[in-house]
Amino acid sequence: MKQWKILMMFILALATSGIAFSQGEQERLNTLAFEMPRRPGAVFSHDDHTQTTEISDDCAICHHVYANKTLVPDESSEDNACSDCHSLQPDRKNSISLVNAFHKRCKECHYDLGKGPVLCGECHIKK
């Protein structure tokens, strides 16, 4: 009887980990602002990323705020979508397009740290 319980616990743990893994695979950056994206949204787990990079204390590292093209210290845009400030095409208000804002922010950090994906297919993984 004890072996049966252990076997059932193992099967339940295995099944649960499979569900968690498949849900984790589905976390993608929102691409609704793009009319016809050429690639799927980048696979990105916010919680895993902040824990791995140890930047969870300073959201403004990624969720920055600019006023008159100057970084506003200690301000965070974490409640806004990137597309709230960055448009598809650069304009007078914002000189960086939405695509470049995503790529520049992520890739610069990955290059600076010497780790993390930098090639298209490493982030934009097909389902």
Image (spheres, rainbow, N blue to C red):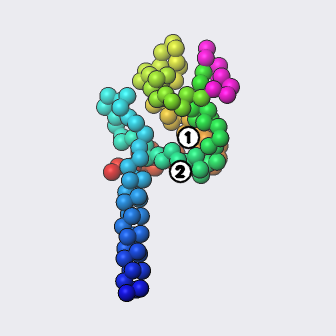
Of 29 and 108, nearer the camera is 29
Q: CA distance from mark 1 to mark 2?
A: 17 Å
Q: Quick one: which residue is furthest to the right in this view? A: 73
Please, what is the three-letter code of the amino acid marked with disc 1? Lys
Q: Residue at x 37, y 70 (%)?
A: 12
Mark found first going from the N terminus, 1 or 2: 2
Of 125 and 68, nearer the camera is 68
Q: At which x and y percent is residue 56?
A: 62, 43
* 17 is within the stretch colored magenta: no
Q: Secondary structure at mark 2?
A: helix
Res 121 visible: yes
The reply to whether the C-beta atoms of the residues labelled 1 and 2 are less than 8 Å apart is: no
Q: Which residue is mark 2?
A: 48
Q: Secondary structure at mark 1?
A: helix
Q: Which residue is mark 1?
A: 107
- Bounds of the magenta segment: 67-75
Image: 20 above or below 74: below
Q: Residue at x 52, y 14 (%)?
A: 93
* 72 is within the stretch colored magenta: yes
Label number found at residue 81: none
